[in-house]
Image: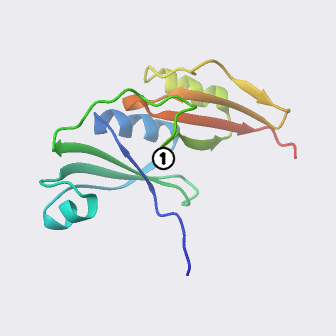
């Protein structure tokens, strides 16, 4: 059986703010829609499922995020996950300039959880709390193996 990752889906409280954050980082919107109906109820497992969705792709064409903002049922606010909690942890992106990426994130009110780490002179990386509390890891390869 062949398998490949199709996308990572993330529920957000404000789809426009999330789109702005991720497109400013360099992702491209490749589709938008509003979904509902029996097929959506069945696929997601929620009666009356109705959501705005946006598909965003990385410039290399390999990574895709599906953002969705629920219209119905009403979205349920939860505490944002912490790095050591079980479940969906984070979405990670390689960037060519972490300082520039962090400036872009800061323009959206998103700052590193603690700071920028240097992993053995191979990567500089930081976790930021993105829109709707999403943890986003930004990593700059320092060009060493």
**What crowding class fits label 1: few (fewer than 14 Cα within 10 Å), some (14-19), or many (20 or more)?**
many
Q: Is residue 18 left or right of residue 62?
A: left
Residue 95, position as x, y percentages in the image: 64, 40
Q: Is residue 11 left or right of residue 91?
A: left
Q: How is the image coloured?
A: rainbow
Residue visible at 48% across and 42% down in the picture? 87
For this orientation, the residue located farthest to the bottom is 1
For this orientation, the residue located farthest to the front is 86
Element assignment for label 1: loop
Residue visible at 59% across and 43% down in the picture? 93
Q: Which quarter of the figure has residue 96? A: top right
Query: Image height check: is 78 above or below 109?
Result: below
Query: Image height check: is 113 above or below 89?
Result: above
Badge count: 1
Front-most of 101 and 34? 34
Considering the image in quadrants, where does the N terminus appear? bottom right
The residue that mark 1 highlights is: 27
Residue 104, position as x, y percentages in the image: 52, 27
Q: Is residue 83 left or right of residue 65?
A: right
Query: Image height check: is 30 above or below 71?
Result: below
Residue 101, position as x, y percentages in the image: 58, 31
Residue 136, position as x, y percentages in the image: 53, 35
Residue visible at 55% across and 53% down in the picture? 59
Q: Which quarter of the figure has residue 142? A: top right
Residue visible at 50% across and 33% down in the picture? 135
Query: Image height check: is 130 above or below 109?
Result: below
């Amino acid at each position: 059986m062949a398998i490949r990752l199709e996308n990572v889906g993330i529920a957000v409280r404000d789809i426009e703010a999330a789109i702005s954050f991720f497109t400013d980082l360099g992702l491209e919107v490749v589709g938008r829609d509003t979904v509902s109906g029996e097929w959506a109820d069945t696929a997601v497992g929620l009666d009356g499922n109705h959501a705005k969705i946006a598909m965003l792709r990385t410039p290399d064409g390999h990574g895709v995020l599906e953002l969705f903002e629920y219209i119905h049922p009403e979205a349920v606010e939860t505490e944002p996950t912490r790095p050591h909690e079980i479940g969906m942890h984070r979405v990670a992106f390689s960037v060519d300039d972490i300082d520039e990426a962090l400036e872009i994130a800061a323009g959206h009110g998103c700052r590193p959880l603690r700071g920028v780490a240097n992993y053995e002179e191979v990567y500089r990386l930081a976790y930021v709390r993105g829109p709707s509390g999403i943890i986003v890891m930004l990593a700059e390869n320092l060009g060493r193996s």
